[in-house]
Image (cartoon, helix red, strand yellow):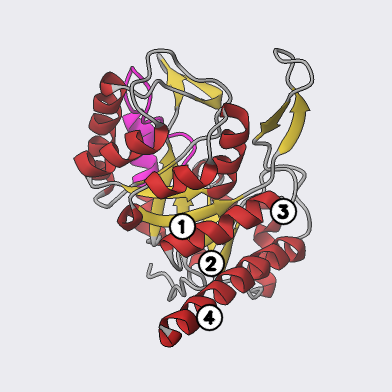
Amino acid sequence: MASAHLNPRLTGVGLRLQHLAEVVADRPAVSWFEIHPENFLANPHAAELLDEVARHYPISVHTVGVSVGSATGVDRTHLKRVRSLVERINPFLVSGHLAWSTHEGAYLNDLLPLPYNEESRDLVAAHLDEVQDALGRQFLIENPSSYVGFTNSTMTEAVFLGELVARTGCGLLCDVSNIYLSGHNMGFDPERYIADLPIDAIAELHLGGFTPEEDDSNRGATLLIDTHDTAVSEAAWALYAHAVRRFGLIPTLIERDSDIPALSLLIAEAKRADTIASAIVSEETCHAAAG
């Protein structure tokens, strides 16, 4: 199945099961959709509707079950299922998380962190090679939302991601909201983080909501939790503008995974991203012409 033409100037929306029938029936004005394959692999009716969506929209596949950080290795059975779906709908991007979520055959309902050192780098790189070989295409790795660090880390997250790109040829999915959230929680400069990422590896941007909670371990402090249940924050919008200035026009996604609103509200956020990106491109074009 051939995907429709992608316009990277336009922003996509995460397609959740609540909106699937509406998209098939109404074909809303959305540039592209991103799906979690795990929502469709054991749901034949949803998979049939997805086939119809893929006839009319470009699709990006974002996995949550391909655990490239797991010490026990990638679940090859699950990877085969993902490959079958990828071959059927021909997405323009396939991505997953820099995290681990499986242990000895058990799936954990979370995306868990790993230390950033040479041992972890070699493990994740080997798993990325396996995933990309199995899929027959490039796989993008998304930067995680962070709440704790490891004393045995020997490099920053951005450097770690850059080394994975250099070793495996993978791409990067830059979650701008995660960078803002992690910078707040871990005390680093989000703009410095963006500056340290390899520009040529960035193939997709994400924007999602987070929720502030009191930090029980540090009275008076606030943690930002990656809940994906609210609108994109003003701080994340500002960092998105900074990311566009560094990376240029990159396919951008509005994510929402719980407390999901009407599709029209997500489309409105996508249009806001388009407006921000277009204004930056126009501004830089004017500066270039003047210079």
SS of the residue under disc 2:
loop
| Kind of residue sitting beneath label 3 | Glu
The residue nearer to you, when weighing 34 against 189, is: 189
Is residue 50 visible in the rendered image? The answer is no
Distance from label 1 to label 2 (Cα)?
A: 8 Å
Sequence-earlier tag: 4 or 3 = 3
- Numbered circle sitting on residue 234: 3
What crowding class fits label 1: few (fewer than 14 Cα within 10 Å), some (14-19), or many (20 or more)? many
The structure residue drawn at horizontal position 66% and vertical position 73%, both measured from the top left corner, is 28
- Numbered circle sitting on residue 60: 1
Q: Which residue is mark 2?
A: 32
Verify CB contact (< 8 Å) between mark 1 and mark 2: yes
Sequence-earlier tag: 4 or 2 = 2
Q: Main secondary structure of the magenta part?
A: loop
Sequence-earlier tag: 1 or 4 = 1
Q: Is residue 207 left or right of residue 231?
A: left
Mark in front: 3 vs 1? 3
Q: Which residue is mark 4?
A: 282
- Where is residue 35 drawn, in percent x and y? 53, 52
The residue nearer to you, when weighing 99 against 234, is: 234
Q: Which residues are magenta?
A: 63-83
SS of the residue under disc 1:
strand
SS of the residue under disc 4:
helix
Mark in front: 2 vs 3? 3
- Numbered circle sitting on residue 27: none
What crowding class fits label 3: few (fewer than 14 Cα within 10 Å), some (14-19), or many (20 or more)? few
Sequence-earlier tag: 1 or 2 = 2
